[in-house]
Amino acid sequence: MRVAIAPPKSGLQDYIDWLSPTFTVFVLKPDEDITGYQALVLTGGADIGKNQERDRVEKFYIDRALFLGIPVLGVCRGMQLVNVHLGGTLIEDIQETTCQHGLDRELLSVEGTKISAMPSSFHDVIIAGDKIIKVNSRHHQAIDRLADGFKVTGSSPDGIIEMAENTQFLLVQWHPERQEVREMYCSFSLIEKFKQMILCLQNET
């Protein structure tokens, strides 16, 4: 299965290492046509609006995926971008809500601290109605109003939407690609779920 990655500013190798045992992975160049690929991965990174060129390119990929009918996996920022582009809204800072998880705010306030070098926090997510899984957390924004046509399939006990999907999009707020969770359910189960989504859409065409 040929899977295209819209590359992040950092951490690309983590995505390649995570995906390559199951998929043949290709790294997209800006504005590259995704025709010929069987799926698209939108990665994590800076807040939407911080890099308008990256936003523009990835919105182009989303529109092409919709036109071509290929599945999309959105991770963290990728989840948020899909939601906003398709009509949803964001919580700009989850620390201003009742949310009790996320990156360490004291560390974030230290001048020169790089988010990529910060340790993840971990918390529970409820999926499939009553199944509780452990995930890593590296975000300070989250989905507020979910775009039309999606359903929430995972949420944290403090009310943050952690997973949403429809027949074409699989969106998660955590980082399944990181080495720290590769052996955990939140990571390997997502690979299988994405694979089955690809196969299902292929069978429909």
Image (cartoon, rainbow, N blue to C red):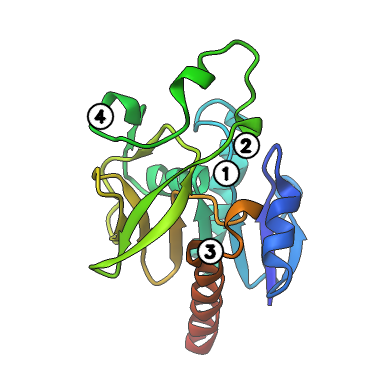
Secondary structure at numbered mark 3 = loop
- Residue identified by numbered label 4: 97
Say what secondary structure mark 4 lies in.
loop
At label 3, the amino acid type is Met
Residue 27: x percent and y percent?
75, 55
Give the mark, 2 or 3, whose residue is nearer the N terminus: 2
User: Residue 63 location in percent, x, y?
Assistant: 51, 55
Disc 4 vs disc 1: which is toward the camera?
4
Sequence-first disc among 1 and 3: 1
Query: Residue at label 3?
Result: 184
CA separation in Å, label 4 and label 1? 22 Å
Residues under labels 4 and 3: Cα distance?
28 Å
Residue receiving disc 1: 44
Helix, strand or loop at mark 2: helix
Residue matched to label 2: 54
Could you tell which of marks 2 and 4 lies nearer the N-terminus?
2
Q: Residues within 10 Å of mark 4 (few under 14, many from 20)?
A: few
